[in-house]
Image (cartoon, grey):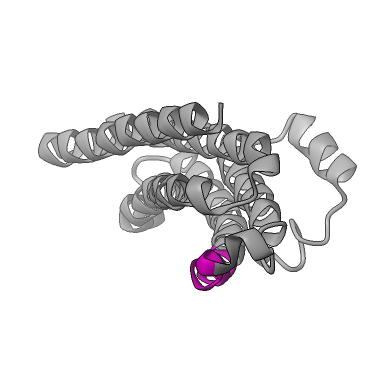
């Protein structure tokens, strides 16, 4: 039975997750790390927002902060869901790729499994880029005493983006269409470059 965020990552103690990650097993692996890093970044940013809500000196920014609070909670949930999606996609692709090339199931299901293995980290990269856009808007309207936490959230969000890029990059050679490979590679590198610029801007603003 497939796992869900509520039955696995949400309820799994951190020590247990790290032990499972360290084990000689394909999942959880880099995909789960990328996603959970994004979730940690969103949660840390939410702490910054929580310390900014209902603060008199930031009264004019309360509507924006309330919207950011809700968005960050959704983003953290999304990352956890994508961790599960990535693990399921990789497990299916790994299983199918071990079948003989003449196996009809491999021929029928492998292309879809490969697409899922690429689309999951693409979604993580997109969510990381979106998170950095939100974090960039938070520096002027959040509690300045937590600016180091906001900077750390940005660093982690970029790390999630970089990790997702690697998961895309490693799977692209398996795509048979050169045009599609080129398109996805360009998309990934563009988002990665934008994420790096936003992380740098946030760090500079927080310094």
Q: Nearer the viewer, residue 49 or 199?
A: 49
Name the residue located 35 percent from the left edge and 40 percent from the top edge.
101
Q: Residue furthest front?
A: 57
Q: Residue 90: percent from the left, percent from the top?
A: 52, 46
Which residue lies at the image location 53% right of the left edge and 50% below the top edge? 86
Q: Percent from the top left, x then y, of residue 145? A: 70, 41
Q: Is residue 130 above or below residue 197?
A: below
Measuring 31% from the left and 35% from the top, which residue is drawn there?
194
Residue 178 appears in the figure: yes
Using the image, determine if residue 29 lies above or below residue 134.
above
- Which secondary structure is most common in the magenta stretch? helix
Q: Residue at x 23, y 40 (%)?
A: 187
- Residue 11 figure quarter: bottom right
Q: Which residues are magenta?
A: 60-71
Q: As rendered, which of 177 and 194 lies closer to the eye? A: 194
Determine if the magenta segment contains residue 4.
Answer: no
Left or right of 6, for residue 57: left
Position of the C terminus by quadrant: top right
């Amino acid at each position: 039975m497939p796992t869900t965020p509520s039955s696995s990552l949400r309820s799994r103690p951190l020590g247990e997750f790290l032990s499972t990650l360290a084990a000689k097993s394909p999942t959880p692996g880099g995909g789960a790390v990328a996603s959970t890093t994004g979730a940690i970044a969103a949660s840390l940013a939410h702490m910054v927002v929580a310390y900014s809500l209902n603060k008199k000196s930031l009264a004019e920014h309360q509507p924006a902060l309330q919207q950011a609070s809700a968005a960050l909670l959704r983003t953290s949930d999304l990352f956890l869901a994508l961790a599960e999606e990535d693990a399921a996609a990789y497990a299916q692709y790994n299983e199918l790729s071990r079948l003989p090339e003449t196996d009809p199931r491999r021929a029928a299901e492998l292309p879809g499994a490969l697409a899922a293995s690429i689309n999951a980290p693409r979604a993580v990269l997109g969510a990381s880029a979106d998170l950095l856009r939100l974090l960039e808007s938070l520096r002027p309207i959040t509690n300045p005493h937590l600016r180091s936490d906001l900077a750390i959230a940005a660093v982690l969000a970029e790390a999630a983006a970089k990790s997702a890029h690697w998961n895309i990059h490693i799977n692209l050679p398996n795509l048979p269409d050169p045009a599609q490979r080129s398109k996805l590679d360009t998309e990934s590198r563009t988002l990665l470059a934008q994420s790096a610029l936003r992380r740098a801007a946030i760090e500079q603003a927080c310094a």
